[in-house]
Amino acid sequence: MWDLDSAEAAEFTKLAETTYRDVNIALANQFARFADAAGIDVHTVIQAANSQPFSHIHQPGIAVGGHCIPVYPRFYLWRDPAASIVRAARDTNAAMPTYAVDLLVDAYGDLSGARVAVLGVSYRAGVKESAFSGVFAVVAALQDRGADPAVHDPLYSDGELVGMGLSPYHLGEPADAVVVHTDHALYRTIGARDFPGVRAVVDGRRATDPTLWDAVARRVIGDGRTRPHSSM
């Protein structure tokens, strides 16, 4: 417990901690996008950088969700609208779902009419919580590209998915492409055999086992194996 001198200082502490995490993730996402353009695996770069005692770079990913990290920086910006670093970080993280769909377009091609299975509603693995989940932005970005997205999550029933405005997907049903939004443990053990007809997968959480996706165009955010151009 920290003894702060005012309620305002205590509230500022919470905003500072959460905003730091959002900015840190945004930096990792910027590094990931550069790495994709340069043909470098950002994950090995981050591991090497974090071997230094004062480097604590977070991991990049398809979205930032939950009650705190995507929200509290907005509270801070409300009181400090000149905080350009905070605003840029929030914009960077909010753009990642569209970036992931750009990766899918590069791997698959025109998504018009494509059946895309989106894996995961939860904003965090193993947690049944959809508050500010990036899945909604992923689905919207796919629909903007003319795709037909359907969503799977082992923690949610079909009725719950429908209640959130999402079309349910069941493993084993045909799918042209896959986007991994949540790193649930289940998604580390499934592969192309679970998605008849699949041609491409975008892993937004570095969760999939590449050996289970043979003959499928596989992209991982920041792995440097593709050079997307749509949102760069």
Image: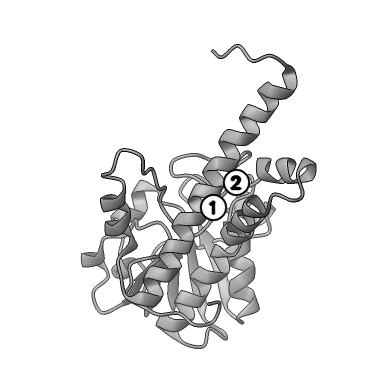
Q: Which residue is found at the position 40% from the left and 48% from the top?
A: 57
Q: Is residue 152 visible?
A: yes
Residue at 64 percent of width and 15 percent of height: 4
Q: Can you give x and y, in whole percent of width and height, for residue 228 in the image?
A: 45, 79
Q: Nearer the viewer, residue 148 or 58?
A: 58
Q: Would residue 125 be found to the left or right of residue 46 on screen?
A: right
* Disc 1 secondary structure class: loop
Vertical comparison of 30 with 147: above or below = above
Residue pictured at 69% horizontal, 23% vertical: 9
Q: Quadrant of the N terminus?
A: top right
Neighbour class for label 1 at 10 Å: few (<14), some, many (≥20)?
many
Residue that badge 2 annotates: 130
Query: Measured from the top left, where is residue 41 in percent x and y?
Result: 30, 65
Q: Which mark is residue 121?
A: 1
Pointers 1 and 2 in contact (C-beta within 8 Å): yes
Please determine whether, in this image, residue 32 is positioned above or below residue 101.
above
Residue 174 can be seen in this image? no
